[in-house]
Amino acid sequence: MITQEAHLSRILHLVSPLPVTEVPLGDALGLTLAANVTASVDLPPWDAAAMDGYAVSLTDFTPGTLPVTKTIPAGHRTPESIGPGEVAAIMTGAPVPDGADTIVPLEVFHEPTQDLPADITFDQVPEANRHIRRRAEDTTAGSLVAPAGTFLRPNHIGAIAATGTASVYTARQPKVAIISTGDELVSPGAPLGYGQIPDSNAPLVAATLESLGAEATHQVRVRDSAASLEHTIAQVEHTVDAIILTGGASVGAHDISNYVLSAWQHDDPDQAIRFGDVNIRPGKPQGFGLSPAGTPVWSLPGNPVAVFVSLHIFVIPGIRKMQRQTPHPRIHHVVTTQELRTPKNLHYYMLATVDDNDRAVPLPSNSHLAVKMGQATGLLHIPPEIDGVPVEGTVEYIAL
Ligand SMILES: Nc1nc2c(c(=O)[nH]1)N[C@H]1C(S)=C(S)[C@@H](COP(=O)(O)OP(=O)(O)OC[C@H]3O[C@@H](n4cnc5c(N)ncnc54)[C@H](O)[C@@H]3O)O[C@H]1N2
Ligand code: MOO
């Protein structure tokens, strides 16, 4: 029996990050930064008004009526200055004129209007340094905005654009071929003859890859024939970054993935495809290695929930490494509403629904229960050292 840890670490050892390319910021959502992004400019680039109002010099200031000598809207392109006894009408986001010590919001003097008054009356000395966004308060040019490894969400895109950057460096997205094996498989939606089932693994794997930003370039169904499997792999092997097979990973007479891939010779035996039982349920029979051309190949068991667990524990970390991203999933902790009994010495994964209060209701988790998989919000993980968790006990949880 291979441990989950040993199998995963072999996968991460054999999978390499993909080459880096420059991508326009508009296409970068959901990609992972391969290089730090630093600010091209100070932000704010200059002292700016935070309120619509009046910029005032407090040098020799005495309350009374003062003339409004200029108007500075946002986007004003000429540096301005004011001297003692002068007031400039200023709009939110406009550069603060030299000599101004504070901004007083317009409501202090009058109702909002488009016709600004020629002068305004101060009853008292205004407080200094109010309503001014200081230059470089947010960041300085050259400072880190987002480190390499950041998975770009909309907020990162906004922050990077704000600091004057139009493109980012990211790993090329993995192209992956998905091969479902099994004489029993037909396209989802096709009429089922006796003994036939819809191929649900290919759509599951493809959707998982797409959710990571990777591209499922091929989805091929092959019959349980060594010749067809060899032919299919030969056709896709040189155009993809990885191949994911489902089915035929076990030891049955028709489990062709195991027989075909185990027979491949590799110059470096450490890199060859190896099959074996891993201490994980579901998902026990696993194959992984590099094809003779050096393409990583995951050979997963056929049962849909076993595929689902295998994707989360063994495939997603490898794809993330290709994307130059942190490979490991975020583990949460939740409270189980039922006692969980599991075999010792196995990493046991259970489908579950977890509510907003982090309370988990386990679902039946046998590896063929595809519809139960559809009801889950994630996977509970009971590690090999224990044989269960009592009701109201804390348990690890991988959210989808
Ligand atoms: N004698 C033994 N039999 C089995 C063992 C074992 O150790 N000794 N392990 C069992 C476990 S655990 C698993 S998991 C499965 C894995 O089997 P295979 O990887 O060889 O997968 P298949 O036999 O091809 O299929 C298993 C199951 O999944 C269904 N399937 C396959 N492909 C798809 C697909 N694309 N979409 C939907 N469903 C699919 C298939 O019809 C089978 O029902 O082996 C156990 N047996
Ligand atoms: O381990 Mo198998 O993957 O039970 O279904």
Image (cartoon, helix red, strand yellow):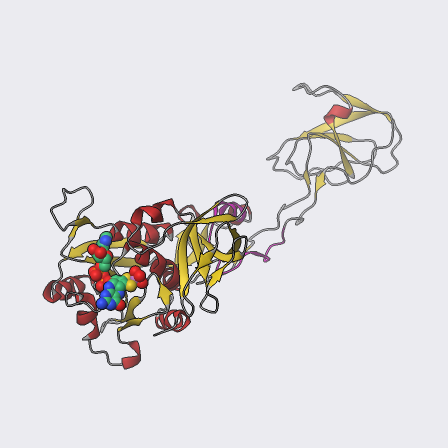
Q: Is residue 6 visible?
A: yes
Front residue of 313/70: it is 313
**Residue 217 placed where, x, y %?**
25, 54
The answer to whether 128 appears left or right of 134 in the picture is right
Q: Is residue 80 above or below residue 384?
A: above
Q: Is residue 61 above or below residue 262?
A: above
Question: Which quarter of the picture shows residue 118?
Answer: top right
Image mark count: 0
**Residue 261 placed where, x, y %?**
20, 71
Q: Is residue 320 visible?
A: no
The answer to whether 141 appears left or right of 59 in the picture is left
Front residue of 296/190: it is 190
> Quarter of the image containing the N terminus?
bottom left
**Residue 90 placed where, x, y %?**
69, 31
The answer to whether 165 appears left or right of 186 in the picture is right
Residue drawn at point x = 18 percent, y = 71 percent: 259
Front residue of 266/104: it is 266
Q: Based on the picture, tell me whether residue 56 belongs to the magenta stretch.
A: no
- Where ligand 2 lies, by image quadrant? bottom left
**Residue 233 placed where, x, y %?**
18, 64
Residue drawn at point x = 53 percent, y = 59 percent: 147
Residue bounds of the magenta highlight = 139-159
Front residue of 78/225: it is 225
Residue drawn at point x = 73 percent, y = 20 percent: 117
Q: Is residue 183 above or below residue 121?
A: below
Q: Based on the picture, tell me whether residue 148 belongs to the magenta stretch.
A: yes
Question: Which quarter of the picture shows residue 251?
Answer: bottom left
